[in-house]
Image (spheres, helix red, strand yellow):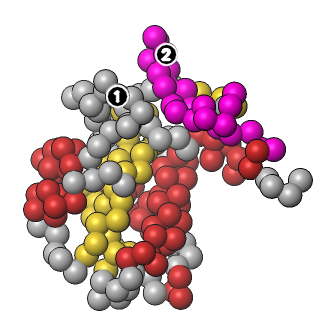
Amino acid sequence: MVENLIKKNRSYRRFNEQRKVAPETLKELVSLARYSPSAANRQPLKYIISHEQEKNEKIFPCLSWAGYLENWTGPEPGERPAAYVIILNDNEINQEPEAAKTDVGIAAQSILLGAVRKDLGGCIFGAIDRKKLRQNLDIQDRYDIMNIIALGEPDEKIVLETSESKEDIKYWRDEQGVHHVPKRPLNELILNS
């Protein structure tokens, strides 16, 4: 059921780094993005996949982890992602990176839902040191770095809860390390009911 896939598709930030993600799996996930809709069917998105430790170590320090968890700088060794998918906009196909944002959102969701089906989890990153990443991976200037999806076997429990107030949307961790994610109630979202 789609609802179960979506509820299981959380922003995981701690992984079992020992469970590797095969390059074939990453290619299958990118293929799901390839089948996704694209504005004017331009299909400007390109991808860099990474499952090798050495390459992963060039990506990891370019990411900002969990802004609401002020005293947490990210996962420790052993909890880090086993793989990444970097989503790029090819400026030779689409010279309007703003217009590519819808394509990026659809592609990222397709990748993450596919990952959930394979008992993997992920987290989409927009907070990226793009200059450092471009340098670390020698990414050509023709490509805009849009997002990075960190992937692996989730190694944390995430609980969805209904937000108690309009301001209560910050995720948090309890003493046992359970990650709590408040969601606004449905009646707050639909304006014409």
Is any atom of residue 6 visible in this view?
yes
The residue under the point 49% across, 16% down is 174
Residue at 49% from the left image edge and 52% from the top image edge: 112
How many numbered callouts?
Answer: 2
Q: Position of residue 150 (x, y in %)?
A: 35, 47
Q: Distance between the residues labelled 2 and 1?
A: 14 Å
Name the residue rendered at 53%, 82% in the picture. Answer: 39
Please rate how many residues cluster around mark 1, counting C-alpha atoms within 10 Å: few if below 14, some from 14 to 19, many from 20. few
| Residue 64 image-quadrant placement | top left
**Marker disc for residue 70:** 1
Image height check: is 9 above or below 146?
above
Q: Name the residue under label 2.
A: 174
In the rendered structure, which segment of residues is drawn in magenta? 164-187
Viewer-nearest of labels 2 and 1?
A: 1
Q: Residue 27 at what x, y percent from top left?
A: 37, 63
Say if 94 sits above or below 89 in the image. below
Q: Position of residue 17 (x, y in %)?
A: 29, 34
Does residue 120 appear to the left or right of 163 in the view shown?
left
Query: Would you say 31 lies left or right of 20 here?
Result: right
Which numbered disc flags the more N-terminal residue, 2 or 1?
Answer: 1
Q: Where is residue 179 in the image (x, y as percent from the top left)?
A: 50, 26
Give the quarter of the image for residue 76: top left
